[in-house]
Image (cartoon, rainbow, N blue to C red):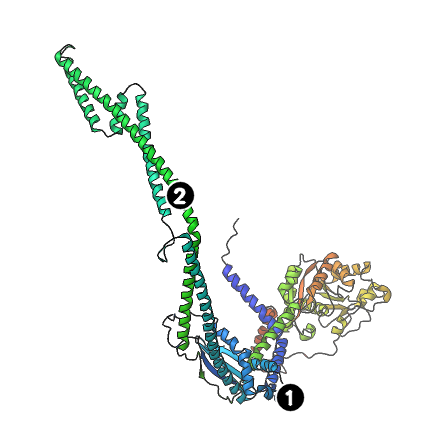
Amino acid sequence: MEAPKNSFGPSQNNQDAKLHFLDYWRIIRIRKTVILAVFLLVLLTTTAVTFILPETYMSTARIEVGKDTPDVGSILTPQAPMAYDPYFIQTEFEKIKSTKVLHKVIEQLNLQNVWAKRFGTDTLKIGEAYKILVGQIDLRQSRNTSLIEIRAYSDDKAEAAEIANAIAKEYSAYRKDARGDLSDSGIKALEGEYLKQTTEVRTAQQKVDDERAKVGISDMGDAYFTQTTEPETVREIERQRVGALAQYTQLNAVLERLKSLEKVGERSELRKALPTTVADPHMERYLDDLAKAEQQYASIQNDFSDEHPEIIRVMKVMTTINKQIEDRIDGIMEGMATKVASAKRLADDLETQFDKAKDTDAKKRKDYAVYFQAKRNLENQQRILDTIFMRLLAEKVDANIPKGSSVQIVDPAFVENKPVRPNIPLNITLGAIVGLIMGFGLAFFIEYLDTSVKTIDDVERALQAPVLGVIPQNVGSLMQEGPDSPHAEAYRVLRTNLLFSRKGEDMRTITVVSGGAGEGKSTTIFNLATVFAQNGARVLLVDSDLRRPSLHKLLNVSNSLGLTNFLLKQNTIEEVIQTTNLPTLHFLPSGKLPSSSLGILNSNQMRDFIVKARERYDFVFFDSPPIMGVSDASILASEVDIALLVIQYRKYPQVMTLRAKQMVEKVGGNLLGVVLNNINISQDSYYYYYSGYYYDYYSKHEDSEPAAKNGEAKNGEAKKPERATTVEIKQKY
């Protein structure tokens, strides 16, 4: 079934691409310190190395290189247009770098001794000097030309120019000497082949003469006479024999057909067949006369009787004509038999002549075979000799034609006063580019290795649970910051999402768990309870982290009496619950935990306490230890109505967070959602629309307030409450 088309497909793709780009930008902003550090390290290192490197000078000599061709085309072998050779220039590069050229340059400039002194050695071998020289030259082809640039590099500016000019001169001399050597060696080789081939021709000619005398053939010295007349005779006799045999077959077939008609006994059929088979004028005339007589007889037969003289006369005429016809038929048959016998004899005679001619031809062919083979060999040898002679003559003529040099020095090298190495701007630019690339690469590699929670999508994809709230960094106690604090809005969003996400209004006991320590669950539960209390709900905040209690520090109260005292039945609930600055917020410290009562949360007293707290308060919040290390968090998650999972941004791996969720679900806890904590809004713009909007909103709201009087803030700034060193806590009962 075809999937329905989405009319919003293109815009959705654009949005995905935009978000994808924002993910990269988020990584860059978060890892900007790493990127900047790597960039500066590479840039400073490159700059330092660039200024430390020694100066190198370059001189360039340009030469024009062409193939070896004479100045004037040869008369015997016209010069054809030179074909394009894509490998010619590269081949010449290798020739320039060859030992035949560079060794002479080293000897001419005495580079062995010069470099030995420069490098502080006694001697420098020619091979070592060659390797140094190859490393100091660079060959390049000018685009779309036959010009080669010979670039020489050296710490000595004068030496660079000398090396470039010396290489150009030595290469030109090498090409000229190589061309002369090749021409001389080629002529000598052709002369040797010419003498050798002359001997071969003489030997072949002598063999032809001997075979001619042996078989007694006379071809009058005709070079093209290579066969006898016997084959032609055989072909002519064969043609005649085939014709005679065909004629005999045709005549014999006609005769046999006529004889078959005659055997029937009625010669009337024979009379009908003869005129169409044998062209005989007498037979045709007799048949016409008989037809006329029969017509006459038929016309008078009814008028006269058989004894009438006219009837008798016509009957005699018909009898005479029939006799003539019969005699003519006998003559024709005898003549046909004679022709058939004659054709048979002719075919037999030609067959005999054909066999005799074939035997004669076979004998002659065998006798003349050696002669004709020797003659063909002579012709081939003579043709080869003529070819070698023409090539030798052409090479000698070409050798005497003046030739210009195939290598022309277009621009000699001059001493350059400005060094080409190090190229400070280029090196620094490349260092900056490489530094940026390495910085970005390292940043993205670190991000790839970081498996912690980074985005809301990571949480919802890995945990399959909704994110109910996003808490920014540096959030303190909302009780001290006041209800107008920008941070409070994040918790109000969390409170709203929590209320709308719970399945029923009777779900009023809440705990906050986390996978590891330091993820901000205590601060989250404290501020969330504060927000609920500020909204008018009667709230009880219970510090049920018995091993590492911390909520009493936020309220600056004593932890001597608390939950453990009530569960151990040492004090009543009225004695352990304390009030806070918020009339609707009450606090129950954890109390001291005896070593013999570590499992006290998993008791009937704790269950009874939760029931009593639900009856007295609208909402009861329980702080808990990390769920991965202590069983108390799992017990609390199973006893209360709602559990929230706090995840600190970029702290623990996703596997650990997933394990914490699974532990809550295994004990039957109701994990309502996730709180993503400690988000750096200033660095990660991904979360701006979750929390950053409130900062802008409140700052603009405060700017619009009129100047305060009687000690309030001026210039549009709200007066911040002073942080009290001690918060006044009164016991409720």
Say whether residue 88 is left or right of residue 679: left
Which secondary structure, mark 2? helix
**N-terminal label among 1 and 2:** 1
Q: From this viewpoint, is residue 709 visible? A: no
Comparing 317 with 205, the one in front is 205
Examine the image and state in which quarter residue 646 appears.
bottom right
Comparing 379 with 148, the one in front is 379
* Residue 653 at x, y percent in the picture: 69, 66
Q: Which of marks 1 and 2 is in front?
A: 2
Query: Which residue of the protein is positioned furthest toward the right in this rendering?
Result: 596
Q: Name the residue under label 1.
A: 120
Q: As displayed, is residue 236 above or below residue 263?
A: below
| Label 2 CA crowd tier, 10 Å (few <14, some 14–19, many 20+) | some
Which secondary structure, mark 1? loop
Amino acid type at circle 1 is Gly
* Residue 215 at x, y percent in the picture: 41, 52
Q: Mark 2 points at which residue?
A: 358
Say whether residue 116 is left or right of residue 352: right
Q: Distance between the residues labelled 1 and 2?
A: 97 Å
Examine the image and state in which quarter residue 705 appears.
bottom right
